[in-house]
């Protein structure tokens, strides 16, 4: 199965941040969310807040330090036009950066992947990982052989065990090739 890696990465990062803060995560979530959204992201070169609003977020320390970049925009003759122009520039930069990051990820993926050519009737071995809390020990890394019944798509195949298990059941499942 394939998933949305970007969303999973965001969730993992937020979980790590909440874990580091310990306890009462529901009270700390708004602050963690704000911290995540105001941090500059490597892929875009900008914070998510800046990508959405066209400016950096104003935080309490900015008020103490007298940051003026947002107040200057509001004081201009046409603040809406100025904000819109800045927002368009930021979004264009983010769009280009995301494209470049996507290309880098694709190159990395292609360097690690190899094409798998199997057809119905072929025999294959399956990697069935053991549970994390159980030591692998002398258990085999691969199980099988399994017969490929049909190709679902470029990454998924329906397979069936060549021998029934101890109870006489035949294992049949759709698996992901990688």
Image (spheres, rainbow, N blue to C red):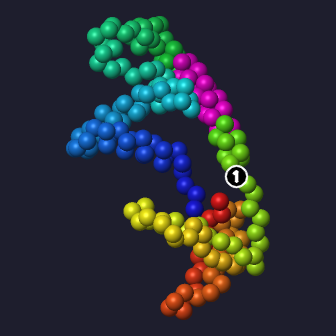
Q: Which residues are magenta?
A: 85-103
Whether 84 is among the magenta residues is no
Residue drawn at x 75%, y 57% is: 115
Which residue occupies the foreground of this view, 141 or 43?
Answer: 141
Residue 141: image x %, image y %? 57, 67
Residue 53: image x %, image y %? 46, 26
Q: Name the chief secondary structure element in magenta.
A: helix
Q: Secondary structure at mark 1?
A: loop
Whether 87 is among the magenta residues is yes
Which residue occupies the foreground of this view, 142 or 156?
Answer: 142
Instruction: Work out whether 11 lies above or below 144.
Output: above
Residue 64: image x %, image y %? 28, 10
Instruction: Work out whether 167 lies above or below 71.
Output: below
User: Does residue 74 appear in this view?
Assistant: no
Q: Is residue 155 left or right of residue 74?
A: right
Extreme residue toward the front, this view? 138
User: Does residue 41 appear in this view?
Assistant: yes
Residue labelled with disc 1:
113
Q: Is residue 138 left or right of residue 106?
A: left
Q: Residues within 10 Å of mark 1 (few under 14, many from 20)?
A: few
Residue drawn at x 43%, y 28% is: 39
């Amino acid at each position: 199965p394939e998933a949305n890696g970007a969303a999973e990465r965001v969730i993992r990062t937020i979980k790590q941040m909440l874990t580091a803060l310990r306890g009462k995560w529901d009270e700390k979530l708004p602050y963690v969310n704000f911290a995540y959204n105001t941090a500059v992201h490597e892929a875009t070169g900008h914070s998510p807040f800046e990508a959405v609003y066209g400016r950096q977020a104003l935080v309490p320390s900015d008020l103490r330090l007298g940051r003026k970049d947002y107040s200057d925009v509001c004081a201009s003759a046409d603040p809406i036009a100025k904000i819109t122009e800045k927002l368009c520039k930021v979004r264009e930069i983010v769009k280009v950066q995301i494209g470049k990051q996507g290309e880098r990820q694709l190159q990395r993926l292609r360097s690690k992947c190899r094409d798998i050519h199997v057809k119905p009737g072929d025999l294959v071995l399956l990697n069935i990982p053991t549970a994390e809390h159980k030591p692998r020990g002398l258990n085999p890394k691969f199980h099988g052989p399994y017969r490929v019944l049909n190709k679902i798509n470029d990454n998924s195949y329906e397979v069936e065990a060549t021998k029934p298990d101890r109870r006489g059941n035949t294992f049949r499942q759709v698996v992901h090739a990688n």
